[in-house]
């Protein structure tokens, strides 16, 4: 039962429902430091890479886990490494580069960790005297610009992003690091997600925190489209001018705001999900003094309900209705669309938000029974559908299901003045449980984001890291899968075929890593419709397991950005 509402919780936990693992393959090689490949190298093609594909598959993720004798503690802490697979005329080349962030540069110069990251605190300089080291504990650490989560796009420029107030502009071809961009110089936010959404008018939407004397706020930010330059060339500088906060949502608990990784957007609405992963602000002020890293201030509090804040994307008006649901956590949303007076939201959800802190390098480098034990204790994420009724007022009847969509089992009931309680529909059948759940979801974003859709492409998690690629029909809940023992695929990205007439006309790309063989990584290309292999490009280098990516499609005047809703 939810302690706040007294409503019954739904079903057994996702961990309990998925099969236990035994004899898992070691993934230690997937989180080892790699060497960059600054100049493009050829790959060996097997099968056929469709000749119509013309563009760059860009990937991001941690790639260096130590400086000198200092070692990072958490997978998220590794220095950002950018990867580019350039595909043209059925051929593929590969290059990579470490992001030359301030964090990377300072650490390299000192040959030790001098900038704190999510799970690793930078220790005082041993060359300082004891008093200088003591007082350095009382200085608040500067936010990192180690942007290792995603490639994002604003006004035609590519950036790499993490979850602080800093991004780095990059060249999507050479992977050259350009200037550091500080969100606080444009809008009053202290951070921003690495999972923006893109409107069809060219505007980009994101969310960021702000806090001060007036409290803690979750802010929706709109960056306008790139202005037409006429005959003049676009100036080669970062441009976030015109960005503005369109809505500020006060935290339900100002001293314990919620962590968030992404948000929901349809054609007319944005939904911010205030989930029970809490940030203890008092601990945040003390963690540097105590020598504790940022991840230690995050706690999972299942006593709290999940709150869905509904905002009109065009006016910035936040609904006065409070939509609640049972405690859950979500990192990545699949899609959202409006139908029959409701907002349908599909997302990957779990029942234990403590999992974020579990991805320490110590855990990931376990072997044998210890690795099995770690995996079997982890929360598995499963796709769920929530439905928000858009018109709720004093005349709305109490305790009646307000969702009237065909074949939908999600419910929404008014429980009091301005209060609606949501229950979800399970957006899968039992076959998915054999793949360990579903995460890193992708859709045909250019055509279907914010609109009714049918297919989602994702990773299955029968291991700590993804060990399968999945295509699911959200109408029938039928699955197609690509799975080979001992191979670990990255987040899939859908690339539409030219002149496509159906939602799944195109290909799905993923980077596949084999931890048992040296330099055995390959770029996999699947037919999106049949989910069968068309070809692969074998890369003669070692590539660590990454986070998110996009496809920079040269065939289209408006670049297709296949976003992930995160890490």
Image (tube, rainbow, N blue to C red):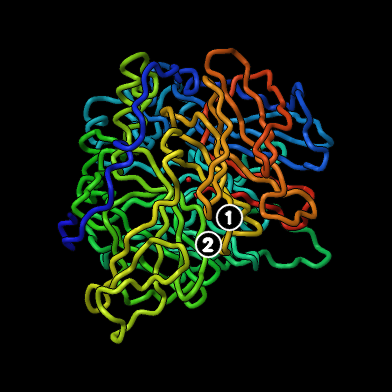
Q: Is residue 411 above or below residue 63?
A: below
Residue at 59% in and 47% down: 159
Residue at 72% in and 46% down: 506
- Side of 289 relative to 268 (left or right): left
- Side of 9 relative to 261 (left or right): left
Residue 280 location (% of width, % of height): 23, 49
Camera-side residue of 557 and 180: 557
Q: Is residue 8 above or below residue 88?
A: below
Farthest bottom residue in view: 395
Q: Please state, as top left, top right, bottom left or bottom right, where the N terminus lies in the image.
A: bottom left
Task: Report the mark closest to the observer, 2 or 1.
Answer: 1
Residue 337 location (% of width, % of height): 52, 65
Element under label 2? strand
Residue 190 location (% of width, % of height): 40, 55
Q: Is residue 443 above or below residue 83?
A: below
Q: Is residue 160 visible?
A: no
Separation (CA) of disc 2 from disc 1: 24 Å
Element under label 1? loop
Camera-side residue of 166 and 447: 447
What number is the disc on residue 528? Answer: none
Q: Which residue is mark 2?
A: 205
Q: Is residue 191 above or below residue 219?
A: above
Q: Which image quadrant for residue 231?
A: bottom right
Q: Dot 1, how many residues are within 10 Å of its Cα: few (below 14), some (14-19), or many (20+)?
A: some
Q: Which residue is mark 1?
A: 454
Camera-side residue of 120 and 541: 541
Residue at 69% in and 29% down: 95
Q: Are the residues flagged by discs 2 and 1 in contact, CB closer than 8 Å?
A: no
Labels in figure, total: 2
């Amino acid at each position: 039962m939810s302690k706040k509402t007294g409503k019954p919780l739904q079903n057994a936990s996702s961990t309990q429902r998925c099969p236990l693992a035994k004899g898992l393959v070691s993934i230690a090689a997937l989180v080892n430091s790699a060497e960059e490949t600054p100049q493009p190298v050829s790959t060996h093609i097997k099968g056929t890479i469709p000749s119509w594909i013309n563009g760059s598959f860009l990937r991001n993720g941690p790639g260096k886990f130590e400086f000198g004798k200092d070692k990072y503690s958490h997978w998220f802490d590794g220095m950002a490494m950018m990867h580019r697979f350039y595909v043209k005329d059925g051929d593929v080349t590969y290059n990579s580069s470490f992001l030359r962030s301030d964090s990377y540069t300072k650490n390299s110069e000192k040959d030790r960790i001098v900038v704190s990251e999510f799970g690793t605190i930078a220790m005082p300089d041993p060359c300082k005297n004891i008093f200088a080291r003591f007082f350095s504990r009382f200085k608040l650490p500067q936010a990192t610009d180690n942007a290792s989560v995603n490639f994002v796009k604003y006004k035609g420029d590519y950036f790499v992003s993490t979850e602080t107030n800093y991004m780095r502009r990059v060249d999507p071809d050479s992977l050259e690091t350009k200037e550091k961009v500080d969100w606080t110089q444009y809008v009053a936010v202290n951070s921003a997600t690495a999972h923006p959404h893109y409107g069809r008018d060219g505007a980009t939407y994101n969310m960021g925190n702000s806090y001060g004397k007036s409290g803690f706020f979750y802010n929706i930010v709109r960056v306008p489209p790139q202005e037409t330059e006429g005959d003049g060339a676009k100036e080669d500088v970062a441009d976030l001018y015109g960005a503005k906060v369109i809505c500020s949502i006060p935290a339900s608990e100002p001293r314990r705001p919620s962590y968030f990784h992404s948000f929901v957007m349809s054609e007319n609405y944005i939904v911010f999900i205030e989930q029970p992963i809490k940030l203890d602000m008092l601990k945040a002020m003390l963690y540097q003094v105590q020598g504790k890293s940022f991840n230690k201030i995050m706690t999972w509090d299942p006593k709290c309900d999940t709150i869905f804040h509904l905002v009109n994307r065009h006016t910035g008006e936040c609904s006065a209705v409070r939509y609640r649901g049972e405690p859950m956590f979500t990192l990545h949303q699949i899609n959202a669309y409006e139908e029959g007076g409701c907002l349908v939201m599909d997302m990957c959800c779990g029942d234990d938000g403590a999992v974020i802190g579990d991805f320490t390098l110590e855990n990931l480098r376990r072997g044998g029974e210890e690795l099995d034990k770690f995996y079997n204790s982890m929360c598995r994420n499963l796709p769920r559908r929530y439905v928000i009724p858009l018109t709720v007022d004093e005349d709305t009847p109490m305790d009646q299901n307000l969702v009237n969509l065909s074949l939908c089992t999600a419910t929404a009931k008014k429980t009091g003045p301005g209060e609606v309680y949501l229950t979800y529909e399970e957006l899968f059948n039992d076959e998915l449980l054999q793949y360990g759940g579903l995460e890193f979801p992708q859709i045909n974003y250019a055509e279907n984001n914010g609109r009714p859709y049918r297919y989602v492409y994702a990773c299955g998690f029968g291991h700590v890291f993804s060990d399968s690629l999945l295509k699911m029909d959200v109408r029938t809940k039928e699955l197609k899968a690509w799975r080979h023992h001992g191979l670990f695929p990255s987040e899939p990205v859908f690339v539409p075929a030219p002149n496509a007439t159906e939602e799944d006309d195109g290909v799905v790309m993923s980077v596949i890593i084999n931890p048992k063989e040296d330099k055995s990584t390959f770029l996999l290309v699947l037919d999106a419709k049949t989910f069968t292999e068309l070809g692969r490009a074998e890369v003669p280098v070692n590539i660590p397991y990454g986070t998110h990516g996009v496809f920079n499609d040269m065939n289209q005047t408006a670049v297709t950005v296949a976003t992930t809703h995160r890490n």
